[in-house]
Amino acid sequence: MIWATVLISGLFLGMLILLEVGRRIGRYKLKMDPKGFHKGITGVENAVFGLLGLFIAFTFSGALTRWDARRSLITEEVNAVGTAFLRIDLIPSEKQTEMKNLFRQYVDTRIETYKYGNSETVEKAKLDQGAKLQSEIWALAITSCKSPDASVDAGKLLLPALNTMIDITTTRVVASETHPPFIVFNLLFLMSLFSALLAGYDLSGGKTMNILHMAVLAIIIPLTVYIILDIEYPNQGLFRIDMFDKYLIDLRTRMG
């Protein structure tokens, strides 16, 4: 996830700079007004750092919730496709071979859709291909269910299963594109920078530069923000959701 690495690197450098700026402002204030150096800043610091903690908790929790939802949708899709595939036995035997071949092609397309999820062009092409196969499967199912040789429950059981299988595709696409508004991340970045400015000001009371505290703050906050972005945009970083697509691959193997 190159773009996130660039953003976090910028945040890290920005925090280091503002820590030093805040420290120099504090040194100047201490020199000009030693007695009033800390007056009135505690409430501001508590408010800013408290709000920063709230935003980090909010975005982290939301990212994990959406990550879990996307993972659950993979299970739902595997179950939906598997159920529909089993119910192919309800249609006439001469139609089953064609239907099962279409299902195998469809599952192959779904696997490739998520395998190349980092490329929007490839992903869109695979989604379009999958939609075409869905139409073919549905049309064949309608014709097969109307056949006199079909089971009396074919339409009642197969068509709803196919409908669920098709609907889950849209649900997964929407889930993958659901993220907080960018203003939330912008505000998180700004609050991180302001917190660095205030921290630098507060650390200016010592006779020497407190490098350890400044380094820890400049590292831990950008690292936390990076993890949030990594979870929020799976299949692009460390927290990859595509490892759960193995269940779809297992299903394809069982299809023969």
Image (cartoon, rainbow, N blue to C red):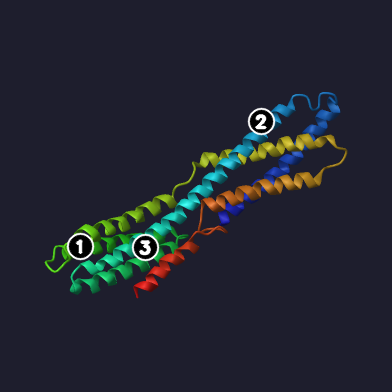
Q: Distance between the residues labelled 1 and 2?
A: 63 Å
Amino acid identity at mark 3: Lys
Determine the image quadrant of residue 105.
Answer: bottom left
Q: Which mark sits nearer the N-terminus, 3 or 1?
A: 3
Q: Position of residue 202 (x, y in %)?
A: 77, 34
Say which residue appears at 79% left-offset and 27% top-offset: 38
Which one is nearer the viewer's eye here, 105 or 89? 89
Q: Alpha-carbon neighbours of circle 3 within 10 Å: few (<14), some, or many (≥20)?
A: many
Return the residue found at the far left. Answer: 148
Q: Quadrant of residue 58?
A: top right
Residue 47 is tagged as 2
Mark 1, residue position: 154
User: Distance between the Cα atoms at labels 3 and 1?
Assistant: 29 Å
Which of marks 2 and 3 precedes in the sequence?
Answer: 2
Q: Which of marks 1 and 2 is in front?
A: 1
User: Where is residue 210, by image quadrant?
Assistant: top right
Q: Is residue 76 shown above or below 26?
A: below
Disc 1 residue type (three-letter): Ala
Q: Is residue 89 left or right of residue 56?
A: left
Which residue bears the numbered disc 3? 126
Residue at the (26%, 56%) spot, across then down: 160
| Badge count | 3
Mark 2 residue element? helix
Q: Do the residues labelled 3 and 2 touch (CB within 8 Å)?
A: no
Q: Is 159 on the left-hand or right-hand side of 146?
A: right
Q: Where is residue 79 in the image (x, y as percent from the top left)?
A: 37, 61
Q: Where is residue 208 in the image (x, y as percent from the top left)?
A: 86, 41
Locate the C terminus and report the quarter of the image it occupies. bottom left
Left or right of 23? Residue 134 is left
